[in-house]
Image (cartoon, helix red, strand yellow):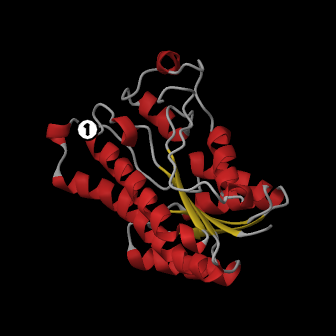
Amino acid sequence: MTRVAVVTGGGSGLGRSISAGLARAGHRVAVLDVNADAAESVADELRAEGGHAVSVGVDVSDEASVDAAFDAVRQSLGPVEIIVTSAAIAGFTRFEKITLDEWNHYLAVNLTGTFLCLRAALADMMAARWGRIVTISSAAGQQGAPGQGHYSATKGGVIALTKTLARDYAAKGITANSVPPFAIDSPMLQEQQRSGRLPPSEYLTKAIPAGHLGTGEDVAALCTFLCSDAAGYITGQVIGVNGGAVV
């Protein structure tokens, strides 16, 4: 069945791949991103491939911006039935060097942004008594990551929030699951490698039993399944896309 799907952070990286996967599954996709031009570029790509897509610029850390974005989605596509929260920031700062402003910025984008977007979508799902929530967390939120205390804490919070939503709304036909990737070949990872914050890919793969980095399509395939009717009995789960690096 065709549904309305929102993907935050859909203008690049994992969000772009997830948007494409949902569009290929036949859903009407709203690509949300703080970079409105990037979001529109992705929506253009999806439409060129025969999909039904719109783009909306949004700052997920700002309540008014999120509410306006979801209003725009409803006006263009209809009530929201699927949401994948992929918008996030990542970086490296030794714990003792993290300022309160930096800490609050990570919380605002990664955790509060997830909260605001899920809250904005939830009323539509409750009215339909059907919904699919997928949060993109991180292996860092499962096991921590050196130099990423702020990032790890927010992603751990995303996992806990997802589990709570699963318990609260399962009886209303809404599932909530979290996907924590590890070492996915993406613009975010490549930027960290260029800055010297992450080692080259051939070093990273030593920690991955599968022997290679993951791709955006690997993550998108799982998200697309979790957003389907077939996944209706799967909720509250944390399902890694990591090549066996986190078990």
Drawn side of residue 12 relative to residue 189, left or right: right
Drawn side of residue 42 relative to residue 95, left or right: right
Drawn side of residue 51 relative to residue 174, left or right: right
For the point 71% across and 58% down, which residue is it? 228
| Rendering coords of residue 217 (x, y %) | 68, 41
Q: Regarding mark 1 in the picture, which secondary structure is present there?
A: loop
For the point 65% across and 38% down, which residue is it? 218
Drawn side of residue 172 relative to residue 120, left or right: right
Task: Choose top left, top right, bottom left or bottom right for residue 63.
Answer: bottom left
Residue 85 visible in rendering = no
| Rendering coords of residue 229 (x, y %) | 73, 61
Extreme residue toward the left, this view: 96
Amino acid type of the residue tagged 1 in the rendering: Thr
| Rendering coords of residue 28 (x, y %) | 74, 68
Up/down of 160 relative to 113, above or below: above
Up/down of 214 relative to 25, above or below: above
Q: How many marks?
A: 1
| Rendering coords of residue 103 (x, y %) | 24, 52
For the point 61% across and 61% down, which residue is it? 39
According to the picture, the residue beneath numbered tag 1 turns out to be: 93
Of residue 14 and residue 132, the one placed in the foreground of this image is: 132
Residue 118 visible in rendering = yes
Extreme residue toward the right, this view: 50
Of residue 166 and residue 109, the one placed in the foreground of this image is: 166
Up/down of 19 relative to 173, above or below: above
For the point 62% across and 42% down, which residue is it? 219
Decide: few, some or many residues near mark 1? Use Cα within 10 Å; few <14, some 14-19, many ≥20: some
Up/down of 239 relative to 36, above or below: above
